[in-house]
Amino acid sequence: MTQDQLKQAVAQAAVDHILPHLDSKSIVGVGTGSTANFFIDALARHKADFDGAVASSEATAQRLKQHGIPVYDLNTVSELEFYVDGADETNEHLQLIKGGGAALTREKIVAAVAKTFICIADGSKLVPVLGAFPLPVEVIPMARSHVARQLVKLGGDPVYREGVLTDNGNIILDVHNLRIVDPMGLEAQINAIVGVVTNGLFAARPADLLLLGTGEGVKTLRR
Ligand code: 5RP
């Protein structure tokens, strides 16, 4: 199976998982990236069975609208049963690195509100220790050099993601060469640096369910 076929399989598995719980009032939280796009396309086939969605990025909002799925501002939504999103890396505790698509801050906000966070990923994303994928950090533009110096003190090699501005108007530093043995601790430490909006570690709020695409089918891991 190709990586795209694995992504498609987990996207469909997520739809199959949430569908029995949806009704005409349900709002679904939707992530960002190629796996999330497969999820949107699969979800759209059932758009008559739920009310609408909250999007974690402008790109996702646009794709949802193209399918005719209403997109709500998170502030107007009182309850979000499910958030479905991909990841750049996951460990067996369902702690994640996210932000490859620069949407980490909005993704973290929607994940914080949702009762159940379902992560969908192809099998290559499961790693024993997080950090081979450079950790994205969203930073207020004027704080770029300050934050980079602090990240070096933490043992990382920050690289400015050239030409990228987040949906919030900020820049991304990708931190290379981290071996993240304490994801919760590092998430808090980086978020405490002045000028950081948030970082792509999802450890304080990990996924609740991981649907992992493998050659032997979709595996389900729970926290
Ligand atoms: C975007 C993300 C994505 O979930 C992550 O980059 C995985 O993307 P893909 O599904 O394309 O592999 O965090 O900010």
Image: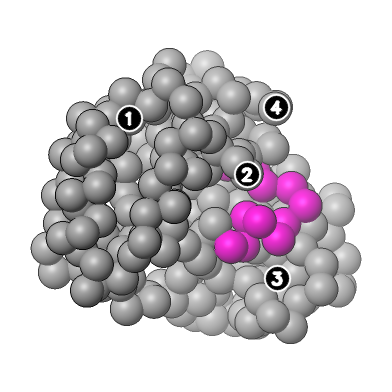
Q: CA distance from mark 2 to mark 4?
A: 14 Å
Amino acid identity at mark 1: Gly
Nearest to the eye among marks 2 and 3: give it: 2
Amino acid identity at mark 2: Arg
Label 4, on which residue? 222
Query: Does the rendering let one see residue 199?
Result: no
Label 1, on which residue? 131
Determine whether, in the image, residue 180 is placed left or right of residue 154: right
Range shown magenta: 109-119
Mark 4 lies on a secondary structure that is: strand
Q: Tell me if residue 163 comes above or below residue 200 in the rendering.
A: below
Q: Tell me if residue 11 comes above or below residue 193 in the rendering.
A: above
Crowd tier of the residue under label 1, counting other residues whose Cα lies within 10 Å: few below 14, some 14–19, many 20 or above = many
> Quick one: 83 or 173, which is closer to the camera?
173
Label 3, on which residue? 47
Nearest to the eye among marks 2 and 4: give it: 2
Query: Does the rendering let one see residue 93?
Result: yes
Nearest to the eye among marks 3 and 1: give it: 1
The N terminus: image quadrant:
top left
Label 2, on which residue? 205
Determine whether label 1 and label 2 are within 8 Å by CB: no
Amino acid identity at mark 3: Lys
> Quick one: 66 or 96, which is closer to the camera?
96
Which badge, 2 or 3, comes first in the chain's sequence?
A: 3
